[in-house]
Amino acid sequence: MDSLEALKKAKIPGPETGIEKKNTVCAICSPAYNCGVCAYVKDGKMVKLEGLDEHPRRDAFAQKDCPAVALLTEKTV
């Protein structure tokens, strides 16, 4: 595996991989309780999702019992 393939497999954002980081919020559980998330996007599709470190509600998103985690991460490539 060459270095570009390794970057793509690890879903590392950058011009080489075509992956961008988009900070946003998740309102699946409750519109009043938005968790900060970072979506990794390639060709208009989310390829990875993680809690946003700077957001005060990041921990709620990271909990395994959060229904959004299962729903959103199932859809990632």
Image (tube, helix red, strand yellow):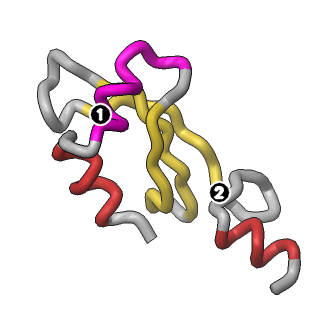
Q: How many marks?
A: 2
Image quarter (top left, top right, bottom left or bottom right) of the C terminus: bottom left
| Residue displayed at 30% across by 65% down | 74
> In the rendering, at what x and y percent does residue 59 appear?
37, 26
Secondary structure under badge 1? Answer: strand
Judging by the rendered image, the residue that carries numbered circle 2 is 19
Left or right of residue 29, residue 41 in this image: right
Left or right of residue 25, residue 33 in this image: left
Q: CA distance from mark 1 to mark 2?
A: 20 Å
Residue bounds of the magenta highlight: 54-63
- Specify the label residue 26 is tagged with: 1
> In the rendering, at what x and y percent does residue 63 appear?
29, 37
Secondary structure under badge 2? Answer: strand
Residue closest to the eye, 67 or 41: 67
Label 2 Cα crowd, 10 Å radius (few <14 / some 14-19 / many 20+):
many
Q: Are marks 1 and 2 in contact (CB under 8 Å)?
A: no
> In the rendering, at what x and y percent does residue 14 appear?
76, 52
Q: Earlier in the sequence, mark 1 or mark 2?
A: 2
> In the rendering, at what x and y percent does residue 39 appear?
48, 45
In the orientation shown, which residue stands out farthest toward the right? 3
Residue 29 against residue 45 in the figure, above or below: above
In the orientation shown, which residue stands out farthest toward the left? 30
Image quarter (top left, top right, bottom left or bottom right) of the N terminus: bottom right
Residue 2 included in the magenta stretch of the image: no
Residue 26 against residue 69 in the figure, above or below: above
